[in-house]
Image: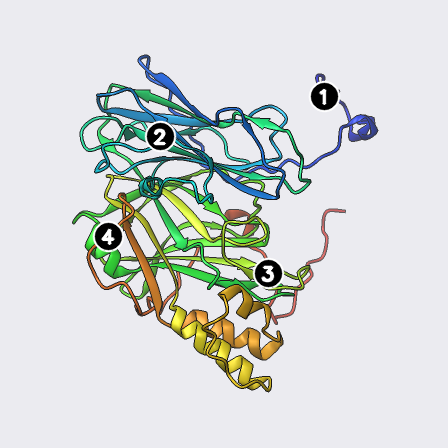
Amino acid sequence: MLDQPIPSLKQLNVSRLQMGVQRILLLRPDTLNPSLPPDVQSLEVLAPDVIIPSQETTYWCHMYQLPPNMPKHHIVMYEAVITPGNEAIVHHIEVFECSPQMDTVPQYSGSCDSKMKPQKLDYCRHVLAAWALGAEPFYYPSDAGLPLGGDGSSRFLRLEVHYHNPLLISGRRDSSGIRLWYTPSLRRFDAGIMELGLVYTPVMAIPPHQRSFPLTGYCTAACTRTALPHGGIHIFASQLHTHLAGRTVRTVVVRGGKEVEVVQEDKHYSTHYQIIRILRKMVTVLPGDALVTKCTYNTEDRDKPTVGGFGIMEEMCVNYVHYYPRTQLELCKSHVDPGYLQKYFSLINRFHGGEGCSCSQKTVEEEFSTVSWDSFSEEVLNSLYTTSPISMHCNQSTAELFPGDWEKQKIPEVLEQFQHHPYRCALGRTAPWSTGATEVQPDHTG
């Protein structure tokens, strides 16, 4: 229809168009993807013709082995491989490298939640690649690559595929996964991927019927001071992630109580468009800086509280940042201290005429489900999340905590927020909250 220019919009017959929605990021950097080196090779880490379970949420784990004694390479690009017809069911995919301290890892292909899953798989947490709905092939900058193989690495990889099957389709087979492009020609920097935000736990929850409820995850100064090199790290890309209720996501660097850089911000976030965004300018994070990731959620259409977790109707608040030089800091996330949450349940129960339970026999999900939700219980929960001590997960690539005391940590203090320069298209506009009169200029053109 649009192969030839048209003289006017009146000649455009929209009834012939196949209607739909296509999301696009207009304000992306004007840079081309680096070309792949001539000696590049590819490796596919795929699900082994899995029969997708007929349930809404499944996390499928599959173990993969690299060739023995594989020398060090650099991953320079990766992309998703989605089985045709399963585009609406495959929600996200990750490839993890296992801890190099393990000589062997049992072969396994099955549900990540199964009691039959070998415990050693819990130590396969070093992210090599992460893809989610809407993401495009990801290219590393020309001076960096993600290490694959060589000394200090493991030949065991764990593929994790999240299937979202709300129609409970049965008998559907899947061989989706990730295609890694790697080269033996090592680049200047070893890159890494770090996970920021909130721990996947039900202690972080959103009340029902909320237009915009905030949750915030922290990477504290104590963790970065412990784990980052003296010169810091440089973030060059970012991938934001929530589930269905997420509406905005923002990660900032806090230094000395002041927001000094915005790593990534999306005020119109969609879980169906989770592209990895190359930053216009690399963001430097120094030892002693804090990283604060805030998400807001809309639960106006929900009658029950939404807890944190892995299910599609549960919630997440995550930012996967790509950076160099690589460190052992794999995950820097937080959640509210559980003891303070129990105090919240007791307070709300007494306020609504109860006796103030000990809550020892109930799960957190059960406690949230029995809360009488009104403006008081909602505001107190928000206050709890913004003032109470937090538990920090300052995790190494081996899935072990860095040495330190990470419980009941103080929330990082933010005394001054980062001020954006206005976009050029916004300059000259009268602010909607302006109280001054608008002067109407006469038209001298006619």
Whether residue 214 is situated above or below residue 69 in the rendered picture: below
N-terminal-most mark, 2 or 4 = 2
Residue 376 x %, y %: 57, 79
Whether residue 171 is situated above or below residue 418 in the rendered picture: above
N-terminal-most mark, 1 or 2 = 1
Residue count near mark 2 (Cα–Cα under 10 Å), binned few <14, some 14–19, many ≥20: many
> Marks 3 and 2, how far apart in space?
41 Å
N-terminal-most mark, 4 or 3 = 4
Q: Which mark is residue 430?
A: 3
N-terminal-most mark, 3 or 2 = 2
Question: Would you say the residues marked 2 and 4 are in contact, meaning their CB atoms lie under 8 Å apart?
Answer: no
N-terminal-most mark, 4 or 1 = 1
Residue count near mark 1 (Cα–Cα under 10 Å), binned few <14, some 14–19, many ≥20: few
Q: Circle 3 sits in a helix, a strand or a loop, which is it?
A: loop
> Marks 3 and 1, how far apart in space?
38 Å
Image quarter of residue 117: top left
Which residue, as the protein is rendered here, is positioned at the far front? 116
Identify the residue at horizontal 22%, vertical 53% (top origin).
402
Residue where numbered disc 4 is placed: 286
Residue 412 x %, y %: 33, 66
Q: Which mark is residue 140?
A: 2
Whether residue 348 is situated above or below residue 298 in the rendered picture: below
Q: Please state which amino acid type lies under the numbered disc 3.
A: Thr
Residue where numbered disc 1 is placed: 2
Q: Nearer the viewer, residue 290 or 443?
A: 290
Is residue 49 visible in this depiction of the protein?
yes
Question: Would you say the residues marked 4 and 3 are in contact, meaning their CB atoms lie under 8 Å apart?
Answer: no
Q: Is residue 174 left or right of residue 339?
A: right
Residue 5 x %, y %: 72, 20
Q: Is residue 173 left or right of residue 155?
A: right
